Amino acid sequence: MATVDITGEQFASTVEDNDIVLVDFWAEWCGPCKQFGPTYAAVSEKHPDVVFSKVDTEAEQQLAAEAGITSIPTLMAFREKVLVFSQPGALNAQQLEQVVDAVKALDMEEVHAHVARSQAEAAVSPQDGTQIPDA
């Protein structure tokens, strides 16, 4: 599968409607991004079951800000709507293959259970920084 350019409007539906989505945040002026692009495209051809998307951070500044992008290229991987990998820096083909294989191998039952526990803990702890008194 070839890489697909996505916008802020398409981002959520792309992540929600596909099992595994990789997102390359890049910019035209970024040298490492240009070097990573062909590697990303080549690996995408080997994994038709994975969506390899690209977000131009210049055109999609709000999305890049919402995603917390501070350095490019940044690669994010989503599996079953959960962010499971995020790392700035260009990867070589072997490293990118390792990321794809690791994402595919995840025990998503365990990941979803961990996310649920984290959300439950966040709901119980106060958000204003006060301490919960011992009972």
Image (cartoon, grey):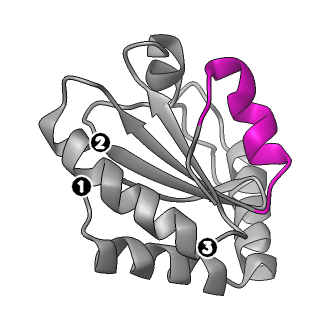
Circle 2 packing at 10 Å, graded few (<14), some (14-19), many (20+), is many
- The secondary element bearing badge 1 is classed as loop
Nearer the N terminus, badge 1 or badge 3?
Answer: 3
* Residue 88 rendering spot, x and y as whole percentages: 28, 49
**Residue linked to disc 1:** 90
Q: Residue at position x 55%, y 67% from top?
A: 45
Quadrant in the rendering for residue 63: top right
**Residue linked to disc 2:** 73
- The secondary element bearing badge 2 is classed as loop
- What's the residue type where badge 1 is placed? Ala
**Residue linked to disc 3:** 47
Label pair 1/3, CB-CB below 8 angstroms: no
Quadrant in the rendering for residue 108: bottom right
Nearer the N terminus, badge 2 or badge 3?
Answer: 3
Distance CA(mark 2)–CA(mark 3): 21 Å
Label pair 1/2, CB-CB below 8 angstroms: yes
| Mark 1 vs mark 3: in front | 3
Q: Please tell me whether residue 23 is drawn above or below residue 77 in the rendered image.
A: above
- What's the residue type where badge 2 is placed? Pro
